[in-house]
Image (tube, rainbow, N blue to C red):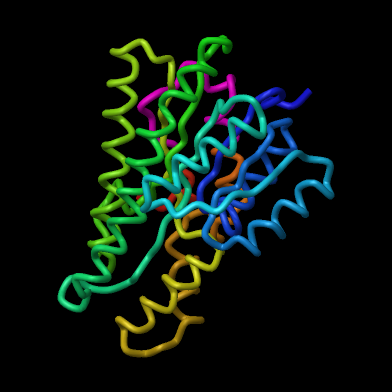
Amino acid sequence: MGRLNGKAALISGAARGIGAAAAAKMAAEGCAIMIGDVLTDKAEETVKAITAAGGVAASTELDVTDEASWTAAIDATTAKYGKMDILVNNAGVFIGKDIEEATMEEWQKLVAINMTGVFLGTKLAIPALKASAADSKHGSAIVNLASIAGLVGSQLDPLYSMTKGGVTLFTKSTALNFARKGYRIRVNSVHPGVIDTDMGAQTFAARAAHSRSNDTDHARSVAISSHPIGRLGQAEDIANGICYLASDEAGFMTGSGMVIDGGLTAQ
């Protein structure tokens, strides 16, 4: 029996990377998945992979910066599965620009996706999550993708840190707010270290550019050496944490941050 049997989830930005891995893991645990992403073709590929493995999944176009798009994605989820038990705010971007280099347009994009997207998804999903919580022993769940950059300072990525720090405290505040209101919606965050995904590759490129060497292999080696566990994280490592927080096994967790970073922030 899967730990998410009978549940339905909407996952933003799940066409690839951590989101796709989370969708596959949660589907394998019995959850019906709705992938929301602007990358519609890639989202459909991920859906096909999940269904081929015996899972239940569908996709819908979702621009996390747009309120109407969120409403449509949530409606698509509840129409498809009859309810929505879980929201995973996974969509995020990384620009890798120093404060003195980033343009206003780049900053606004970072905020729109990393912060406004989480705000809109959380706000607009409340009615559906409250409704499903009434029939669940441990209520419904929101899992927000933050970062270790939202817990400790980053020398090279202060703007990214600012957005992920916002997600970190928004998670705690909404957890308390919903508990005070009796909504039975648990809210927790996940804080990955450096993960071997497309976004991870972006960080290596940014660090190489900052060092003016353009040696991404060296930047990757430095990243690996900074993790005491001796390797970079894989998308599946983070997917496992997301799946746990979404499940009833985490029924006594809300307002918490799960750090999955290979020991990086323990130093």
Q: Quadrant of the N terminus?
A: top right
Evaluate whether residue 259 shows in this view: no
Per the image, is 100 magenta?
Answer: no
Q: Which quadrant of the structure image shows residue 240?
A: top right
* Horizontal and vertical percent position of residue 253: 44, 22
- Single out the residue that lies furthest toward the bottom: 213
* Horizontal and vertical percent position of residue 161: 27, 56
Residue at the image point whose x is 63% and y is 30% from the top: 8
Task: Tell me if residue 82 comes above or below residue 262 in the rendering.
Answer: above
* Residue 155 horizontal side relative to residue 95, left or right: left
Task: Tell me if residue 178 comes above or below residue 63 in the rendering.
Answer: above
Residue at the image point whose x is 53% and y is 13% from the top: 138
Evaluate whether residue 154 shows in this view: yes
* Horizontal and vertical percent position of residue 164: 31, 50
Per the image, is 250 magenta?
Answer: yes
Instruction: Please report the bounds of the magenta region as a residue range.
Output: 243-259
* Residue 7 horizontal side relative to residue 93, left or right: right
Residue at the image point whose x is 57% and y is 12% from the top: 136
Residue at the image point whose x is 38% and y is 82% from the top: 208
Closer to us: 160 or 257: 160
